[in-house]
Image (cartoon, grey):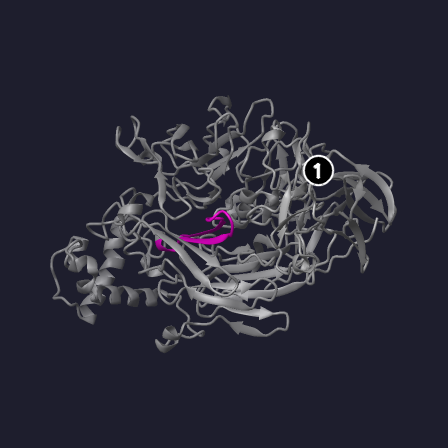
Amino acid sequence: MVTSVVMRRGVLLAVVTAALLTGPLPATAQAWQPSPAPLEHLDRGLVASTTAGGVHLSWRLLGREATGAGTTGLRGPDFVVYRDGKRLATVTDSTTYLDPSPTAGARYQVAPVVHGVTLGRSKAVTAWTNHYHDLPLRKPADGVTPAGESYTYSANDVSVGDVDGDGQYEYVVKWDPSNSKDVSQVGYTGPVYLDTYRFDGTLLHRVDLGVNIRAGAHYTQFLVHDFDGDGRAELMTKTAPGTKVVGRDGRSRYVTMPREDVRAGYSHSDDHRLSPDGYRDHLIGMFRSWHAHPEVVAGRWPATIEQALGIEPRYAYPLSQQDAAALADHFMDVYAPSRSANNKLRQFAGFVVSGPEYLTVFDGATGRELQTVRYEPGRGDDGLMWGDYAMSRIEPGNRVDRFLAGVAHLDGKRPSAIFARGYYTRSAVAAYDWNGRRLTKRWLADSGWVPMTNPFRDSPHGRDGTNPSHAKMTTQGAHSLSVADVDGDGRQEIVYGGATLDHDGSLLYSSTGVLPPGSADPGAAVRVGHGDALHVTDIDPNRPGLETYMVHEGARSAPYGYTLRDARTGEVVYGAYSGMDTGRGMVGDVRPDVPGLETWASMPGGSDSAGIRSADGRQLDTRSPGTNTSIRWAGDMTTQIVNGAQDVTPTIDDWRRGTLLTATGTRTNNGTKGTPSLVADVFGDWREELVVRTQDSSALRFYTSTEPTNRKMYTLMHDRQYRVEVARQQTAYNQPSYPGFYLASDVDWSRVPLPSRPRKNTATRGDAPVKVLVIAAVPCPRGWQAKFGVSVGCSADEVTRSRHRESSTPS
């Protein structure tokens, strides 16, 4: 066998040719093999941050470069550090280096050393001017609502994806107007925008979702991921008539409306937002058609509106316009306030409860619309069937418009897009595959409607849906979802709060508990129920598999205020009844002296804390850390917390050491939730970056940890669960991203999964077996296999793909 080195445009390409071999390959000729689901192509991710002690360098160990367990980390290549082309140091025990004597304007590079051979260098970088990097943003113009209310914009949630295939992430920024609403709040909102930026601030395109997509945490869930495996990420989100893309050329292009919608008279100039008068008209129309409603016809609902409202018969059916208007006025002015003083339906405005709903796939690099289909599940109505009129608080457009989204490898190979609607009553989850040309629905898991005897006075929460196979999904969803391989079959499941869907869409389980003394119905077996926070990972390394930690808001109707559950079976490992809406919860390694991850729950603001508990349920402290979000910031693999909400400066705090970073001049998002725009391992070593908006939203600010570390770990983005969790992080109430294995200060490195283990690779040429030496970590550019007639491996920083801009220089 002959190994040749080829120079091409300054790139060192390790080209391995093959010969027929009769004997086994030597030990050094073991190959890194791509996993069944190819890892995301990433470059070295080298960054240089200015610190008081010098220039701190940090870079990625790629997943396929990790070869086994060491004492304080994983084994893999050593790295040579270069400054201005000259060898500066060799790093063996981490992927960081501090240059204590930097020179102004110095250019840094790193290169892996595999079996004594120094491979291609990374792209050269210079040090950030500060200890952070600002990505300049283009804020949308201010606006005025139909009610005459002014609003401004601030940068909100962020997601990442490599939209152009160069191995570097681009950043999709959601712009939220200042009048953004919770679904329970009335009022108009400004439109939502989704911008895609390069790290240098280049705006690639802007998606204007238009007036028919309301602004708020529960409405727009956007997925950024490479769904078709072509190395470039797509953008997928809910759209409507009026949604358009503004490209780099300044031209606007609307999404494609289905022909039947055009024939029905819908257009991109439609405004389906309801005014107070418009809602009255809507209610009159609903009452006029009451006699024909399927639930009325079937005899499951009262035959007349008067009967449903508990008043004497007054009118003949079908109702006339005048009679329906009289009943609508009675409903808004008499009946609704009698149920609750907060029912002020004369002020109902800004909601979108009719009109087409779409799901659109956009090209991540250009914003070009690739396909638009109908959004499933559709709303059906304004929330009447969803229970929005049934409770004492009458809230049209509430339960019906609770959206979630995520990414899951349902077949163990390709990622699928997950879009969901509803979790208090009806709960429906759809899975889609994108093959680069067409969006195909893989499955739809639907609980069916929750039966009610009277849609204006009933208690539909906790009741089975009408679809027998998924009836017990109802009332279990959280304000987010998680994706994990909970049963270890290599295919990911959807953890939908208190219930979990298997990879094929079937209901794996729905967790329950028994109401204790002092609750609403002692002794009754009920669902664990809805909650605001959800975390899925290996919390207790002494138990097999993964665990789910969740808080529950059912108060006296919920068996637990918080639970740790077996993620495979849904069985409760430990938990406690609280009798209140336990609204916050978090997990993390905040007590490194105790095995496993700790858990804690509280009310918003930290009141009524349940204290810190160990992975096996022992109470360790009556106090607890914050619950906004966690971050892997420290060099010892403990967990830190990002604190600071609304107009408070964000900080990164350690439970033992105090404040580690104060992000002066920045703000978090989402009101009291206080969530950063993003926390994820977007470059540098395995630790997570803090991404927050500047106070005036003129920039996204990136902070990266410069704490010393001797932990060598591949980029978390090469763990399948962590990567899809990052794609999910922006959904509704942002939750941290977790790997699919135990990762903490006391990690057993022998149990950390390797994305690709070294093994022999046997190719074929005709009928003869050919053993091939592969010395690198990622698949080669297209055409190489055909050119050389064998499988060849290439390092991510050693090749220049046709669409990549990164170049390297020989060592």
Residue 112 seen: yes
Q: Nearer the viewer, residue 755 or 523?
A: 755
Q: Nearer the viewer, residue 457 or 3?
A: 3
State the residue in front, 554 or 281.
554
Residue 560 magenta-highlighted: no
Residue 421: where, in percent of width, then height? Answer: 39, 53
Note whether 796 is above or below 591 in the view shown. Answer: below
Q: So how many labels did they put on this image?
A: 1
Q: Position of residue 716 (x, y in %)?
A: 61, 42
Left or right: residue 104 versus residue 232 is: right
- Residue 709 spot, x, y in % from top left: 72, 33
Q: Position of residue 621 (x, y in %)?
A: 52, 23
Element type at mark 1: loop
* Residue 413 lies in the magenta-colored region: yes
For the question of whether residue 154 can be seen, the reply is: no
Bounds of the magenta span? 400-420
Query: Mark 1 highlights which residue?
Result: 76
User: For mark 1, does the 10 Å Cα neighbourhood hold few (<14), some (14 to 19), or many (20 or more) residues?
Assistant: many
Q: In front here: 303 or 671?
A: 303
Q: Quadrant of residue 172?
A: bottom right
